Amino acid sequence: MLRLTIDNITVEVEEGTTILNAARKIGGKIVPPAMCYYSKLKGSGGKCRTCLVKIANTSEMDPRPIPKLVPSCSTLVQNGMVVENTISEQVLKERKAITEFLLINHPLDCPVCDQAGECDLQNLSYEHGLEETRYEEERREFAPIDIGEKIKLHMNRCILCYRCVYTAEQIINERVHGVLYRGDKAEISTFVENFVENDFSGNIIDVCPVGALTDRTFRFKSRVWFTNPMDAHRNCEKCSGKVALWMFGDDVYRVTGRKDKYNEVEEFICNECRFEKKKTSDWIIEGPRKINRTSVISQNHYEKLTKQSIINPTEGKTEQQE
Amino acid sequence: MGGKILLEKINIPGIETFDIYRKSGGYSAVEKALKTMTPAEVVEEVRKSGLRGRGGAGFPTGMKWGFIDRKSEKPHYLICNADESEPGTFKDRYLMEHLPHLLIEGMICSAFALEAKTAYIYIRGEFKYLIGILNKALSEAYANGFLGKNILGTSYCLDIYVHPGAGAYICGEETALIESLEGKRGNPRLKPPFPAFFGLYSCPTVVNNVETLAAVTSILNMGGDFYSKLGNGKSTGTKLISACGNINKPGVYEIEMGITVEDFIYSEKYCGGIKGGKNLKAVVPGGSSVPVLPAQLILKTASGQPRLMTYESLAEGGFETGTMLGSGGFIVYDEDQCMVRNTMSFARFYHHESCGQCSPCREGTGWQERLLYRIEHGLGRAKDIDLLADISKHIEGNTICPLGDAAAWPVSSAIRHFRNEFEFHIEHPEIVKNISHGNIDKYRK
Ligand SMILES: Cc1cc2nc3c(=O)[nH]c(=O)nc-3n(C[C@H](O)[C@H](O)[C@H](O)COP(=O)(O)O)c2cc1C
Ligand code: SF4
Ligand code: SF4
Ligand code: FES
């Protein structure tokens, strides 16, 4: 076992554990935000840089700090390592800058985005965003497109976390979409109008941290915070059949995987469960889901958010909860 | 000595052919290495020479070779990085065009040292005309028994392949290069793991610059100890410098490290002074990514010592008053050049070349360019200068690969040393909108 200290809390973890997963073992406020890492997807992480932390002490053998911040999602723990996250001014400052970078090209169209309320970028901006944007240049723009019958892509909202690409590579047996072009012109796209149609393709919606990939069968039906999440299951031949139903009254508005407190699905589900089974009678309902602790919905942050006008800092417009 | 080592024979007619190269003493380093030395001895010779990577970072080559995982049962690979795409740097292509066999000879010796049986030359796609030259030289080497099976009757076998890139600067970064060579999108990998353990096809791999590998030939010929006495301190040997900008004699020069910057700019042997007898304003000495220095700081260090053409001397003073030797792309600006315009054009390059994987580089490089475009075109606001400096500060150090730093340094250094020019642009939009405005003092009069 290796011993690691994060923000003065010590934890023991197995060899091969990343700093982020060690922090998750402790839990609570000291866990760095992760916009691109996804524990169920091999190779994910390292890109968004929101999880950067400071290494004050590399290891017992080498008690020196590392001058640059490191991505906690892809840096392995060494014995005796001392990490600073929320107690480091430098980390908080850089995280703020990275949040700003993620937002400069973001359309800030939360009022019309189906992800609002369960969006990792909203959560991140709430914690680390600036009150006002310093970006006054043009934002990049893409037209929304349908990639397959059930999935909508709003490239404007994409933060290029590559999670959907890894999902397609690892969960769906044939990847027909990917990243085209470079830099801030890079875009998620299907190859030659090849639609994403596969029994498990819907999972790319669940892994997307923002509203770039959304469920066309749910579009504009309701704001997520008006729906009631319920744990439910059915006998399914393709997947475990364990899902979350998002109900409005007695109607099933949306089906997703069950997400944990880090917004990761516990298990990937098939498209039949996700898109076809929209009747209450299709499901055995277990009971209400506990809403995850980090979500904006559960913390009742909407009130606060609107006051800080983070939702649309450019115009100072805010979304009102009716 | 002070003479040429790499380019010693460049003026011999026909030196690009195997026969002439061989007649002029070529391939003797291969004979020496394969017939009289062990791989470990070749590594040791290179370590003793003090050779530092010529691709930009200046990492000691012998040490890099020492990291390769010899315990691994997987094959080892050697990759020659011939992606040369940094604005201002054009030395490798000169070497490959005129002395292809010097590179191939160096690669054979290096691959032998690394116990690699396959080596690649990853070449910038735009260098189409060089691909033919290299392939011709390779086939001559095969035909004469210097490549292929049982080279020179020894048990050592080696194949070298030329692989063209598809036009992305980022594929010069060694791990992006490896991805690209594997047929994938050229996104840099996270390090660790380093290529010495986990490189091409997950096998131990060394990536070296063209000039580095060519220098191995000279080192084996003259001996590592002898090579280490050339140059100055830890900057041993000679360095190719591609000089361009407002000078009388742009071109590729081989210098012994340790000559003064002043000598390099003004002597007839090298750049031959500033064109039109104008004054020197600034120099970017190591390719577009290294910090720009104003005339007084490039000629003399902050402590008043003459600045030398060495890794150490150019870096003296840190980024406050120093810069870097980098890849040796030496860009000279005369008094009439506009530093804002120049910075904008560098920023545009890095914005265009970011792979887009990590948020600070993907978003920050575009922001930098857009701000600089506005300032350059008379649409800047007072707060933009500090904002720009702040953006570059937050890109630097926060990215997966050094392209982020390379994008930030030209911007932060230009603001550090030429802030008055940025301010002039903001204060005089009507002037900067329409005309060239490098010499702001002329306009102030
Ligand atoms: C964005 C970027 C571009 C690079 N381009 C080149 C290049 O064109 N040629 C090169 O030799 N090294 C280039 N490098 C450096 C390589 O990553 C690597 O350090 C070098 O090839 C190692 O060779 P050396 O040790 O012989 O210098 C680049 C690095 C970065 C970050
Ligand atoms: S579409 Fe979503 S999951 Fe895919 S890269 Fe963009 S933000 Fe990530
Ligand atoms: S720093 Fe830029 S070029 Fe390098 S990996 Fe990140 S986005 Fe790509
Ligand atoms: S979660 Fe670590 S870099 Fe994105």
Image (cartoon, rainbow, N blue to C red):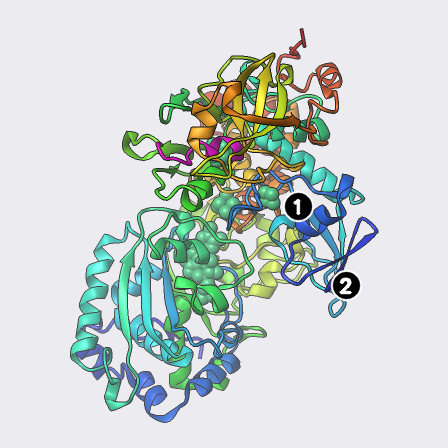
Residue B206 shown left or right of residue A264 in the figure: left
Q: Is residue B10 above or below residue A223?
A: below
**Total count of labels:** 2
Q: Which mark is residue A80?
A: 2
| Quadrant of the snapshot with the C terminus of chain B | top right
Determine which residue is flagged by label 1: A52
Q: Quadrant of residue B83?
A: bottom left
Q: Is residue B257 above or below residue B331?
A: below
Measure the alpha-carbon separation of dots 1 and 2: 19 Å
The x, y position of residue A95, in whole percent, is 68, 38
Disc 1 C-beta below 8 A from ligand 4: yes
Per the image, label 2 sits on a secondary structure element best described as loop
Q: Which mark is residue B154?
A: none
Residue at point 67%, 36% (across, down): A261
Q: Earlier in the sequence, mark 1 or mark 2?
A: 1
Per the image, label 1 sits on a secondary structure element best described as strand
The x, y position of residue A44, in whole percent, is 52, 46
Hey, which residue is sitting farthest bottom in the picture?
B36
Q: Is residue B51 above or below residue A124?
A: below
Foreground disc of the pair 1, 2 = 2
Q: Please check the rendered image and state whether residue A91 is part of the magenta-colored stretch, yes or no.
A: no
A192, B363: nearer the viewer:
A192
Q: Give the residues in magenta.
A: A197-207
Residue at point 24%, 78% (across, down): B147
The x, y position of residue B132, in whole percent, is 19, 60
| Chain holding disc 2 | A
In the rendered structure, which amino acid carries the disc numbered 2? Gly
Residue at point 70%, 29% (across, down): A290
| Chain holding disc 1 | A
The x, y position of residue A216, in whole percent, is 44, 20
In the rendered structure, which amino acid carries the disc numbered 1? Leu
